[in-house]
Image (cartoon, coloured by chain):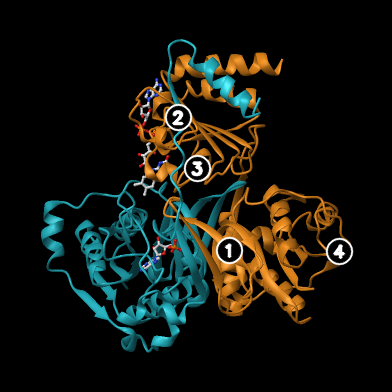
Chain colours: A orange, B cyan
Amino acid sequence: MAEILVYVDHVDGAVRKPTLELLTLARRLGDPVAVALGNGAADTAPVLAEHGAVKVLTADAPEFAEYLVVPKVDALQAAYEAVSAGGSLAAVLVPSSAEAKEIAARLAVRIGSGVITDAVDLEAGAEGPVATQAVFAASFTTKSRVSKGTPVITVKPNSAPVEAAPAAGAVEALSVSFGALATGTKVTSRTPRESTGRPELTEAAIVVSGGRGVNGAENFAVIEALADSLGAAVGASRAAVDAGWYPHANQVGQTGKSVSPQLYIASGISGAIQHRAGMQTSKTIVAINKDAEAPIFELVDYGVVGDLFEVVPQLTDEVKTRKG
Amino acid sequence: MSLRIVVCVKYVPDATGDRHFADDLTVDRDDVDGLLSELDEYAVEQALQIAEEADDAEVTVLTVGPEDAKDALRKALSMGADKAVHVEDDDLHGSDVMGTSLVLAKAIEKTGYDVVIAGMASTDGVMGVLPAILAERLGVPQVTLLSEVKIEGGPNGKVTGRRDGDAASEQLEASLPAVVSVTDQSGEARYPSFKGIMAAKKKPVESLDLSDLDLEAEEVGLEGAWTAVDSATERPARTAGTIVKDEGEGGKQLAEFLASQKFI
Ligand SMILES: Cc1cc2nc3c(=O)[nH]c(=O)nc-3n(C[C@H](O)[C@H](O)[C@H](O)COP(=O)(O)OP(=O)(O)OC[C@H]3O[C@@H](n4cnc5c(N)ncnc54)[C@H](O)[C@@H]3O)c2cc1C
Ligand SMILES: Nc1ncnc2c1ncn2[C@@H]1O[C@H](COP(=O)(O)O)[C@@H](O)[C@H]1O
């Protein structure tokens, strides 16, 4: 059976959910061979094996943390060469994080392959994997293929379910020699993002977002309370972020995160095209807005025309009561 | 020596207009109004600020695109860029990121550069990977997705900046030449002044075609693309949902809906 190289996104050995989703998609195409790099790489093996990795190639070196992107491209290329030497490598799949996309794209140039970014689904086709993408702010759905080289495809979070599918997951050390460009961009300091204790925005099953209608940083407590009652992540529109009410890391939309949760609740957000671009593929959409003409209502499964400061706290109380 | 800054700007269909595909499944750029990608305005802005800080600098804006893409160059020139390069060739139609990046890399080398500045993503393709590919092709450091950028020391100096990632915020440093990309967090772009608009009309716009760049038609365009779009379908409009007016029970009604959908 064909082998599929899967790039593992992890933090110190803790595998992030989109990688497990990627394994589900990879298994549709062949046998997943995972590549984990950096601190804690070997610790990723058990969970990757549980989700279908037949092999886990690992490498750690100070370069991965001390320099931007290129050392990881060198390593992924080494993995590509090792596996394709066997002759049956059918695709390289990479999660659509900002860094991993750059790694994928540079690898593609090096190995003479086409690259597709931000797929939301993948299936096997007669001429290789077929990627589904949502384009133009998700108003169109396209199906594309890589027509040259071994397909390199990046996949967005929430594109497939996480499924248990135990496999061997044998750990093998990958030998990597870094090229001249690997040390080109030095990371001179790194400040980890503080954890809020809430789910990761792009991975959450429910996202509760606030916009300009929230009208102040302190008022975001109302949005956070609803989010916490539902176990949801908190998002914000660019207007709310630009006003300094909420961090940019939580921005949903074209220049923020794109999310595709089971449930998206927009409060005090008008629904501009750039905001839609980041949330339009959510399964169920709910909005609270005092303007009945707000374009967000064109998208909703359920909408309440009203003041968010009345509706949201009432909803939060009701959720808490129902959840007991 | 003058610091040579090349800014990559893309001409894109207006996101607020009715964007769609042409019959050959390429982005329709004829029927839809286009403009300078808003995200590339941030790149132009940072280039101008860097040039203002430097003792001596020259800002060239570069685009690969159809005839109308001149509008994007004019806008960037009216913001304050010094000159423009337009790569235009019928054989470029349908190029994917590999083709476009190849052409841009050749044009950048031909123009001469100490730093290339790009936007974080184009507002039509939204891949966000072209700057990384350019760095790979040019064989220089990649210093991308910066929300803050500084260049010191002229053409032989260095670039530093802050990259706000998912898990951490990183401070980066590389020596020139380098490829930089900036996010929309890097600072508001200036509006062209009346004087700027008038001055832009007299600024030089160099036109290049594939032969000027020693490229063959087969290397670019739809034929030369390394990816193929097989279909594009308009997403069905979401079926109209229920909309209620809050008469005091809106929160409870919403909870009822969420319960019916098994969210609570
Ligand atoms: C290149 C580019 C990229 C962009 N990227 C993004 C992006 O990534 N994400 C993004 O969100 N935007 C983005 N934008 C901005 C976008 O165009 C909109 O300006 C922005 O989404 C508006 O945010 P908003 O809906 O919160 O504010 P507004 O459009 O001002 O809407 C506020 C809404 O709140 C309602 N409201 C006010 N008070 C209350 C109340 N008490 N109760 C209930 N409702 C109330 C109002 O009726 C109104 O509908 C981008 C723009 C550009 C040009
Ligand atoms: N045709 C083009 N001409 C000039 N610059 C481009 C072109 N396409 C993309 N770019 C640059 O590359 C950046 C990222 O584009 P993309 O990877 O396509 O999202 C943009 O913000 C531009 O700076």
Q: In which quarter of the image is the N terminus of chain B?
A: bottom left
Cβ atoms under marks 1 and 4 closer than 8 Å: no
Which mark identifies residue A279? Answer: 3
Find the distance from the CA under tag 1 to the CA under tag 2.
37 Å
First in sequence, mark 1 or 3: give its number: 1
Tell me the amino acid under the disc marked 1.
Ala
Whether callout 2 and callout 3 share a subunit is answered yes
Q: In which quarter of the image is residue B80?
A: bottom left
**Mark 3 surroundings within 10 Å by alpha-carbon count, few (fewer than 14), some (14 through 19), many (20 or more):** many
> Label 4: which residue?
A171
Q: Distance between the residues labelled 4 and 3?
A: 38 Å
Amino acid carrying mark 3 in the image: Met
Position of residue B56 relative to residue A161, above or below, is below
**A220 and A130: which is toward the camera:** A130
The answer to whether one can see residue A69 in this image is no
Q: What residue type is labelled 2?
A: Trp
Task: Name the mark on residue A131.
Answer: 1
Task: Identify the chain of the residue marked 2, using the numbered disc in the image.
Answer: A
- From what the image shows, is residue A168 above or below residue A321? below
**Mark 4 closeness class: few <14, some 14–19, many ≥20 residues within 10 Å:** many
